[in-house]
Image: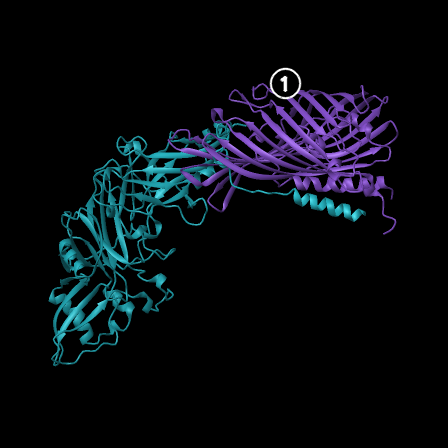
Chain colours: A cyan, B purple
Amino acid sequence: MKLHHIVFYLSALVFVSCEFDESSYRYNLGADFINDPTRVIMIDTLTVNTYTTLSDSVVTSRGKKLIAGRFENALGVVTYCESYFRLDPIKYFSLHETAVFDSACLILYPNGYNFGDTTKTCELAIHELTEDITVEEETGYIFNVKQFAHEPNPIARFEVSLEEKDDLDDNNAVDSIQIRLSDDYGRLFYDMVFNEDTLLEEKDNFIHIFKGFVIKPANNNNSFITGFNAVADSIYTPKIRVFYHDYSPNDELYFDYLLEDFENYSGRDFAIGSLYANTYLSTYIVNDYSNSKFRDIQAGEMKLPSSLTDNVTMIQGGVGLKTRIEIPGIDELYSLGTGSIIQAVLYFEPLKGTYEEESDLPTGFEMYLVDSKNRSYGQLYTIEETSPATAVLNFNNEFKDRTTYSFDITHFFRDEYMAKGDPLYSLEMVYPISKMGYNIDQLIIGNQEHPEHEMRLKLYLTNYQN
Amino acid sequence: MDRFTISIFAFITVLLIFPLSVIGQNNTSSPYSKFGVGDLASIGYGRNLALGGTGIALRDPYHINLKNPASLTTVDSMNFLFETGVNLLNTTSSTFDYDENYWDGNFTHLVLAHRYSNRVMSSLGVMPYSNIGYRLRTLKSLEGEDSFVLTDWVGTGGINKIFYSLGFKVSDKFSLGTEFAYYYGPVIENRKTWAQVQTENPTYYNSSSNYNGVSVKAAFQYYTPIGDKGTNLIIGGYFTPGHKLWGESKVLIQQQYGTAILDTIYFKKERARSIYVPLSYGAGLGLTLKGKYLLTADYEMSFWDAVNSENTYKNQSVYSLGFEVLPQDDLNYFKRCAYRFGLHYDSGYIQSKGYNIDDIRLSIGVGLPVLRSASMMNLTLEAGQRGTLNSGLIRERYMKMTVAFSFQDFWFIPRKLN
């Protein structure tokens, strides 16, 4: 028997003594005599302070719809908006010499966007602009605070009736609104084509004369805001249609001045591309807070505490109303000992009476990290950093009053908790940025002291006593 | 190389492999191994185990008796002993409404015995001192909300023991022995805790401690023939003062979020809370009748109540009884085998909910001589029960088979005819 025999034998021994069983947990054993020192605690008593804040301005150009109207919410805040657009000249279109002008109309296609009290009226008017639509030099955008001057007299007035639209929806047809223009005004557009006016050859010249149009509330009785399609190069694009007849038997002769199609314009400063589509299409959106508790709000650094606004805050697209959320007591959690944040979820409820059905409630709210002056330091992502964190609407069909939103802010909480020390950031909940300038949807939510719609922060954390 | 050198090499080889074989294996599966340093391993193997664990008053030139170093003095002048073994354990753990069954296997010991002189003999060995292996799930309520928190516990590791024993033959009838032991090994506990409300964000607690310690043991044996030839009496005893295992702990707490994020919440290396291994003593009586039968009995006591103030530990008393039909020098192979029976009662040192976690077991064994040598293969089968079903505690019923080999020194003599 030699040494290698011994080594062989010993190796075999080691193998024999290796694992026989790597079986499952003995789930049902042992719970009674081992005390788990790990505590998991739910805390919902941390203070959450909320404020309403307001953006300086919101980009409203380069959108895909025209919105106009006016409505007053339950808190007395009046939202007003009017939209601006331009038309392209008609090129390379000639009429037979026998052609005769019949009539002209403006055609708009409602896109189904309505916000406000749709049971009442929405009367709109269209005016020709007297001021060139200009973009902000630095950014190339137009903002919600920018208003352009127009002729005092409208070229058209019309009332939006939602009932009619519903019928058409059922037939799966696309509704359109045709507003007859005065013959004098319509003939201007006919004559340019009939006479092969040089204005049509050069867009700059055309735009110089026809600076654009505004669609706005015709009076202060409007109770809702409505939207129209504004996608260039589509059959649903806004247009001025001129009807005529000539020697031919066809009695449906017309030509269209279409919504400015920026992609077809290789003009001075802008590259061709869909990114720049509707560069000059924009919306002026303004809120009148004077009859509400929000009357003192100012854009920028100001934080209007919810305690001054009947324990609610507002979030709204279009003007950029946001809800600032401060959680000052995160550091107090250290007094519990070593631990970690498992989950932090903010629950908040829309104010009763501010919505009827699920579609009245906007979704997709985003959260931004902001400093004490409301300056943004980036968007809050989910804890796995795969996608932005957003609010989830849990609509309660049975008991609408119990409808809640939840917002998982675990990532924020974890970062603040791990940072140990002064709070790094506060949170600001905003209407989704990508849709912000093109919607005036709003949400009114209670704060932590609200008697019926209390905001709650549910925090789960582990705690080790060591 | 002389045989001593070779054996030292073999021993060192095993020492190097041994820790690897301990880490990552299930050498026990008992929730009770969560306490203290884990389940204490048997001290005796081979012959001792089958005799109910007795050995304080055993003298046997063909087996190394680990329970009493004074017994080393029986090692025959020509012999060089080498012993090792493995075991296979099947346990059924039960609560009043639930059973689970599992298998474990383990290396049991590796010992060399060597003779320095007519009066001084030694042994050198390595064996598990304790085994840790538990997987548990506990449930508790979440504070502040009506829901639950679950924790999965995984304990692994165990303390190994390297020892060096010396036996002194004071006279033909009286021997003294001493054992110096060095203890080393990890005690690892991993916990995963998660709330029912958010299962994707569990928290991990990982504690890994490496312990070291030394102990010393003093022992004696007194041997006297009485009456007829082949009838004799042995009295033995040992004493071990209490000692401490100390070491370093690494505690790591991590919080997981989803699948990708793992935050380290806490990491610290610190001195581990030392583990106190208590003072113990044992006394034994062995009676050989006409060279044919052996009766042996041990009593041992460990003062665990000094270990802590939490009342979890109680003094431990161990009673063992053994009976052996001794092998005879006969042509019949079966008469050359040894047949052993034992009974072992251990009061346990853990108290839970007012119950001592005691252990009672029966053993039978057979010693099979390897042909044309003094080497022996010892098979032992033990059946036992530990714990209780009362108060939600766990009762373990187990069967354990141990195979131990005692090799004589012919192993280390090169065959000249090869």
Residue B191, given in percent of the width and then of the height, sits at 53, 36
Q: Is residue B255 left or right of residue B22?
A: left
Question: Is residue A154 left or right of A266 when viewed as pictured?
Answer: left
Q: Which quadrant of the figure has residue A165?
A: bottom left
Along the line of sight, the residue nearer the viewer: B170 or B201: B170
**x and y percentages locating residue A10 in the rendered image:** 73, 44
Q: Nearer the viewer, residue B259 or B135?
A: B135
Q: Residue at x 75, y 26 (%)?
A: B58
Residue drawn at (20%, 69%) of the image: A256
Counting the numbered discs, the total is 1
In this view, the residue in front, A379 or B353, is B353
Q: Residue at x 11, y 80 (%)?
A: A249
Instruction: Relative to A224, say whether B138 is above or below.
Output: above
Do we see residue B239 in this rendering? Answer: no
Q: Residues within 10 Å of mark 1 (few under 14, many from 20)?
A: some
Q: Secondary structure at mark 1?
A: helix
Chain on which label 1 sits: B
Residue B103, horizontal then vertical, whole percent: 58, 39
Q: Which residue was labeled with disc 1?
A: B306
Quadrant of residue A450 within the rendered picture: top left
Q: Residue type at mark 1: give it.
A: Ala
